[in-house]
Image: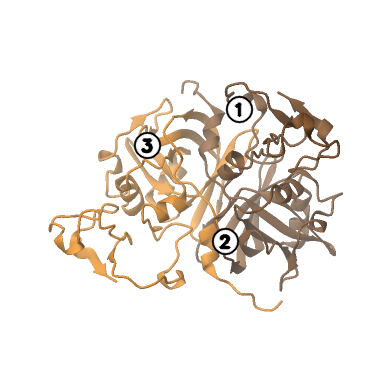
Chain colours: A orange, B brown
């Protein structure tokens, strides 16, 4: 077979949602953002979710065998994605800054800005190079009227989002097609591009922080 | 643990794309529609795809270990989804009615109305009750400028689509929340709801066929 062309930007056109996994770490709730949750079988209802080995949530799922999936709606603020996507549950109390509820199974979920929550019990898993794929039976499901679900594409286009390095869909900068150059202030931690909504970047107060990951203003670089 | 509420309509808010798998059945190209393709790892690039045991394509992937994933764009006509989603590759030459190209790996893909195509080589798989999840390394990728990718939600909302019975996301009619009753003509084979674009249903010619699955007019039922 001749060597094939491999333009990694083709991955940009695959469609995903945006989800918060909720797990227990002993007595403490924690979790992370994922975009790769999908339904595998309908009878029984089984979902698959891919979680990086380096995510603290991965070990918690392996220990407890249980997790919730809260489906983010478009109304979810960037801070939620920043807290759950760009900080580690190992040393951050992620649920301290985000309203949550415990369900009948003793698991945390987000009642606000979410279209619904699944409660899942792991039935099998597969280990890949950097990620574990958990297969889990859905044992509870609640739907909420909260507008349209947030797609990964919406997060990128409207919220200026970037995939954390642990995400299966992470692309190195050199793999991302360059668009026309323009002055942009980019967060050195999470890649958030300042949207100009609070005036010129230089005029932002010194204690201004990245709305996605909370990095201080000096972590931003002009591009 | 107390018994949990399980409203299956919560699955409606999970986000997916729409994809055509292309495989070889001996010398003959065949394939099917899937909505559950997602990237699992980025280095190397590995995707997962869920295919029902009853899909003819499943056996072809197991035999050859290779498939393409063509990412449908919103411009893809319903006939493509009807042909690839509601007919079996066992007794239908699906590629006879849809323009296709063979790539360097000897696999068929759809060049039209698609945002791009991945070429994939199976590296592992997991068997679930009704579906096989194939893990496959992406060895080739081509992106095309073809508008926005079609999401599963777009297919449902704009194209009046329904999941085939073999789909992981298939819901039985009794699980689907009822909306306000209105006279609708519904295809008894694939569930397509006539959109009225060619006038009243009763006035359609006798040789009119379901645009999704090709079923004859008499297969439609008034609801």
**Badge 1 sits on which subunit?**
B
In what element is the residue under mark 1?
Answer: loop
Give the left or right position of residue A168, taking residue A159 as reference. right
The C terminus of chain B lies in quadrant: top right
Residue named by callout 1: B176
Residue named by callout 3: A113
Give the left or right position of residue A77, taking residue B156 as reference. left
Q: Position of residue A80 (x, y in %)?
A: 32, 45
**Badge 3 sits on which subunit?**
A
Q: Position of residue A219 (x, y in %)?
A: 22, 64
Instruction: State the residue in front, B7 or B209.
Output: B209
Q: Position of residue A191 (x, y in %)?
A: 33, 62
Residue named by callout 2: B46
Q: Please determine whether, in this image, residue A15 is positioned above or below residue B64.
A: above
- Mark whose residue sits in front, 2 or 3: 3
- Mark whose residue sits in front, 1 or 2: 1
Residue B174 sits in which quadrant?
top right
Q: Residue at x 78, y 59 (%)?
A: B63
Instruction: State the residue in front, A5 or A134.
Output: A5
Q: Residue at x 84, y 50 (%)?
A: B90
Q: Position of residue A163 (x, y in %)?
A: 41, 58
In what element is the residue under mark 2?
Answer: strand
Sequence order check: which comes first, mark 1 or mark 2?
2
Q: How far apart are the two marked residues, 1 and 3, measured between alpha carbons?
A: 23 Å
**Badge 2 sits on which subunit?**
B
Residue B221 sits in which quadrant?
top right
Q: How far apart are the two marked residues, 2 and 3, measured between alpha carbons?
A: 31 Å
């Amino acid at each position: 077979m001749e060597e094939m062309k491999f333009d990694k930007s083709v991955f940009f056109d695959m469609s995903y949602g945006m989800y918060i996994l909720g797990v227990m770490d002993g007595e403490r709730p924690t979790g992370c953002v994922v975009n790769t949750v999908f339904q595998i079988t309908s009878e029984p209802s089984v979902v698959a979710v891919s979680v990086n080995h380096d995510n603290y949530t991965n070990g918690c799922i392996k220990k407890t065998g249980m997790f919730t999936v809260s489906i983010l709606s478009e109304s979810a603020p960037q801070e939620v994605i920043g807290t759950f996507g760009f900080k580690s549950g190992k040393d951050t109390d992620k649920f301290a800054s985000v309203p949550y509820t415990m369900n009948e199974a003793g698991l945390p979920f987000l009642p606000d800005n979410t279209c619904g929550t699944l409660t899942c019990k792991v039935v099998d898993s597969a280990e890949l190079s950097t990620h574990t794929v958990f297969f889990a039976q859905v044992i509870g499901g609640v739907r909420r009227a909260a507008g349209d679900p947030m797609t990964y594409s919406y997060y990128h286009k409207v919220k200026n989002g970037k995939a954390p390095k642990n995400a299966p869909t992470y692309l190195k900068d050199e793999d991302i097609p360059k668009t026309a150059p323009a002055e942009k202030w980019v967060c050195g931690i999470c890649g958030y591009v300042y949207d100009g909504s609070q005036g010129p970047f230089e005029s932002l107060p010194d204690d201004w922080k990245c709305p996605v990951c909370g990095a201080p203003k000096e972590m931003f670089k002009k591009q």
